[in-house]
Amino acid sequence: MISNSHLLTGVLFQIKKIMSMAANDVEVIYITGNHDEMLRKFSDTTIGNISIVDKAVLELNGKKAWFFHGDVFDVSR
């Protein structure tokens, strides 16, 4: 079993990695999901290269692709 402190260390490492990418001009798009109700209050917010959104439409190979969390299909929400 993974301890809480070990899990927190892993999460903080990932956050640091993402922040480093954003600092190096990589666009970071955070798509909110079912455990992000607090973050949904900040949807459509951009700080530097980091955006918080409920969905993203990107152009890939000349075609539009829609990205979203699957909880949009959860009828119990």
Image: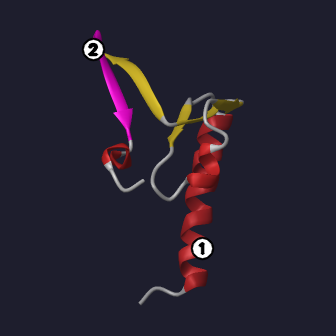
Q: Which amino acid, by three-letter code, is at mark 1?
A: Leu
Count of marks placed on residues = 2
Q: Is residue 64 above or below residue 1?
A: above
**Residue drawn at 41 percent across, 22 percent down:** 57
Which residue in the protein does label 1 denote? 8
- Please, what is the dominant secondary structure of the magenta stretch? strand
**Residue drawn at 31 percent across, 45 percent down:** 73
Neighbour class for label 1 at 10 Å: few (<14), some, many (≥20)?
few
In the rendered structure, the answer to whether residue 42 lies left or right of residue 6 reads right
| Residue 40 location (% of width, % of height) | 59, 44
| Residue 65 location (% of width, % of height) | 31, 23
Q: Which residues are magenta?
A: 62-68
| Residue 21 location (% of width, % of height) | 59, 39
Neighbour class for label 2 at 10 Å: few (<14), some, many (≥20)?
few
**Tag shown at residue 61:** 2
Q: Compare residues 74 and 50 and report the one nearer the observer.
A: 74
**Residue 6 figure quarter:** bottom right
**Residue 1 figure quarter:** bottom left
Q: Compare residues 62 and 16 and report the one nearer the observer.
A: 62
Query: For the residues marked 1 and 2, what is the alpha-carbon distance in whole angstroms?
Result: 37 Å
**Residue drawn at 40 percent across, 21 percent down:** 58
In the rendered structure, the answer to whether residue 47 lies left or right of residue 51 reads right
Q: Compare residues 44 and 30 and report the one nearer the observer.
A: 44
Is 63 within the magenta?
yes
| Residue 47 location (% of width, % of height) | 72, 33
SS for callout 2: loop
